[in-house]
Image (cartoon, rainbow, N blue to C red):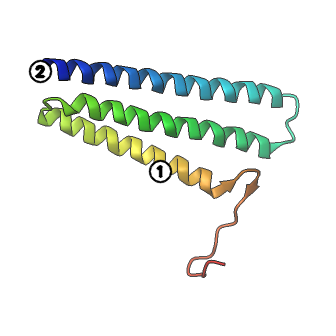
Amino acid sequence: MEELLGLVASWSALILEAVVALLVMYGALEALVRMAGLALDRSDPVMRRRIWMNFAQWIILALEFALGADIIRTAIAPTWDDVGKLAAIAAIRTGLSFFLERDIEAFGPGEEKKPRPSGSAAE
């Protein structure tokens, strides 16, 4: 039974890793196609920012799937070394996701949000 569970977990993690690769490749291709369309019009920094934010969203989604794959791989009979590696990977991926999401929230689609002075009340 344990061997079957290990095999299912291994295949599940492999499928998730394939999804990660597909998500990043799709996001990168989409960004490249859109940037190629903008190559002639260099006067639109807002559109370049939108393309970057869209690509960042694909990367965030891929990071979540990659973390899921790592959790599945570690869930079956983990050693302390495996748990430590998972903790390091999770911390790095969570940090990347946090900063990407913060950048996305800092700039709305097409317009920059002005930072509020600290201590001011929300409107």
Residue at image position (33%, 23%) is 12
> Please, which residue is most extreme toward the front here?
1
Residue at image position (35%, 35%) is 68
Is residue 25 rendered to the left or right of residue 63?
Answer: right
Q: Residues within 10 Å of mark 1 (few under 14, many from 20)?
A: few
> In 3D space, how far apart are the residues under numbered discs 1 and 2 (Cα atoms)?
39 Å
Q: Residues within 10 Å of mark 2 (few under 14, many from 20)?
A: few
Disc sitting over residue 1 in the figure: 2
In percent of width and height, residue 39 lies at 82, 28
Residue at image position (54%, 47%) is 100
Examine the image and state in which quarter residue 69 appears.
Answer: top left
Q: Amino acid under label 1?
A: Phe
Examine the image and state in which quarter residue 41 appears.
Answer: top right
Is residue 38 rendered to the left or right of residue 51?
Answer: right
Mark toward the viewer: 1 or 2: 2
In percent of width and height, residue 37 lies at 82, 27
Nearest to N terminus: mark 1 or mark 2: 2
Q: Amino acid under label 2?
A: Met
Examine the image and state in which quarter residue 18 appears.
Answer: top left
In percent of width and height, residue 122 lies at 62, 77
Q: Which residue is mark 1?
A: 98
